[in-house]
Image: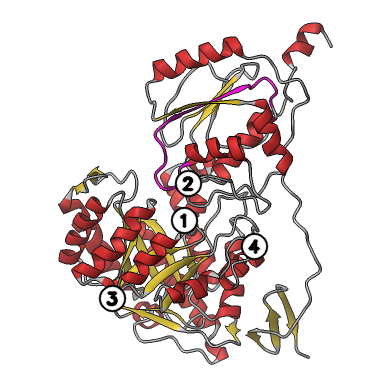
Amino acid sequence: MFRFKREQSVVNVAGVKFGGQPGELATVLCGTIFYQGHRIVDDEEKGIFKREAAEALVCRQAELSEETGCPAVLHIYARSIQALQKYLDFAEQVWTGPIIIDSADPLTRAAGAGLVTELGYADKTIYNSISLSTDAAEGRAIMDSEIDSSIILAYNPSEPGVDGALKLLESGGNVLEKGLIPLARDYGIVNMLIDPGALPLGSGAGAILRFSVVAKARLGLPVGSVIHNAISSWPWLRERGAAIRKCCDAAAGSLQLLAAGDFLLYGPIENAEFIFPVAALSDILVAEAVADLDIFPGAGHPLHRLV
Amino acid sequence: MTKRAAISKRGYDDSWPPVRGDYVVGDPMCGVAVVTLASSLFVRGAAITGPCKTENLGVEKIIANVVSNCNIRFLIICGAESKGHLPGDTILALHQNGVDPQGRIVGSRGAIPFIQNLPFEAVRRFQEQVELVDCIGLEDKDAIEALIVKYQDLARPFPGMPFQAVRKASPRPVLPVGDGDLFLGSGVVADTMAWLALSED
C-alpha cells in the first residue's frame, strides 16, 4: 500500500466523509434503490413501490453501516420526476443520511435538482452526475439549485483510458471546451466525487483501477466507482450461480478499494449484506498496511470497531 | 470445397459474429438483423437478434457484427427505447449522419453517443451495407417476425468482402518518469502517471 504525496481533500456531505489518504477514512458505500427492474417497484413511471420492503432494505443498510463503521449513502434511481418525488418523500421518513439522486433521463435529473432544493434536501443531496452528456439546460438547473455536491463522471469515449479521462476532467480534452471540474465549479459544485465510469469487462473495465490511483495523486479529490456494473454486464458470469456472482462482485469491490477507492456505488441495495463486510475487511487491511506511513484511521473506522 | 460448402460460407466468416454480446444467432445467411433496444424479445427468423441499451458500446457491437456479414442488408430497430441513452435514435443518427472527427455520432440525442473502438471505415460500410427499418416502440413479436419475412425477400448479399471491424490500436508511448507522487514506504516511491514504482536509493 501507499500514501499520496499530494494532500487528499475530504468531502463532507451531511456528516459523511469521503476521501483522504488510503487507510484514513472508511469506505463510503452507496446502495441503489428503485433501480430499473427492482422487484419492489410496481410502476417505475409513477413511483409506486412496496413500502415495507423498501423500508426494510434501507434499514438493513443502515444497520450494516452502524455495525461495520462504513458510512452509507442512499442512491435513489428514478425513471421520472413523479417517481423521484415519491421516493424522496419515502426517504425523508426512513433515512437521515446523504442521498444520491440519479436518472438516465436528463430532464428528470434536472427537475430533481430543483425538487430537492424546494424540499430542503439539497445540502444532503449528491447529484449523479455531471458528465460529458450534461448540456446547458441541465447545467443551468444545477446552477439554479442549492445542490453543492456531485459525482463527476469522467467517461471520455473519444479517448478511452486513464489519460483521456483526466483530460476530460481538467481541460475537456477534444470533446468539451472546458474540463468537467471547472464546469462543475461554475455550476456551484463544491464537493466533487470523481467516478471514471465503469465499462464492461473486455472493453476497458480494468482502467478504473489505475485511474483511481492516478486521479487521487493528481487531483487530490475523492475517487470511487460503480465497478459493480462491469461485473453485472459480464455475460459469462450471468450464467453462473448466485454465490459465484456475489463472490465476483465482492472481489471487484475489494479490488477498487485496494486501488485507493474512497467510495463504491455497489449496485442493488440488497448487496449490502456482503458488500459491507467486504469493504470493512478491505479497510482494515489497508489501514494496517499503511500504519507505518504516518496514516491514522479516523474515529469509527472498521479497524476500531470490528477487531 | 464443394459448391454447396462455398455457398454456405458466402458473405461471412466461420467466426461470425466476431464480437460477443447479449444476442441470439439465427441463420447467418439471412439478410435481416434485429435490435430490440431495451426490450427482451425473442423473435425468430433473423440472422442475429438482441437488445441494445447503450448509445456507445452497444451500438459499436451492432456495427461490428453487421458489417462482418455481407448477407445482412436490413436492420430492424424495434422494442422500447432505453430512456436517456436512446440507442435507437443513435443508430438512426449514425446511419444518416455518421461521426465527427472525435467519434461523436452527429445528430444523436443519446447521452454519450460516441464510436470509440471502430475505424471510421466501419461506419461508412454500415451506412452503405444496411438499410434501417425504424420500428422503435414496436414490441409485437408477430409483427416483427412478419417484417423479417418481408425484408428477407428483398435482401441480396452486399457485393464485397465481410468487413472485419477490429479495434483501433491504441498508441502506447513510452511514458516519461517524473517525481514520485505516491509513497509506499521503505524508500520506495511511485510515479502514478507512468505507473512505475521505484526505489529512492
Q: Specify start and end residues of the magenta stretch as a single range.
A: B69-86
Q: Which residue position holds label 2?
A: B109
Q: Which residue position holds label 3?
A: A123
The Cα–Cα distance between marks 2 and 4, rounded to whole angstroms, is 19 Å
Q: Which residue position holds label 1?
A: A228
The Cα–Cα distance between marks 3 and 4, rounded to whole angstroms, is 33 Å
**Mark 3 or mark 4: whose residue is earlier in sequence:** 3
**Can residue B80 be found in the magenta stretch?**
yes
Q: Amino acid at mark 1?
A: His
Q: Are marks 2 and 4 in contact (CB under 8 Å)?
A: no
Callout 2: helix, strand or loop?
Answer: loop
Q: How is the image coloured?
A: secondary structure
User: In percent of the image, x 37 and y 83: which residue is there?
Assistant: A304
Between circles 3 and 1, the one closer to the viewer is 3
Callout 3: helix, strand or loop?
Answer: helix
Q: Position of residue B97 (x, y in %)?
A: 60, 40
Q: Amino acid at mark 2?
A: Arg
The Cα–Cα distance between marks 3 and 1, rounded to whole angstroms, is 27 Å
How many residues crowd around disc 1 within 10 Å: few (fewer than 14), some, or many (20 or more)?
Answer: many
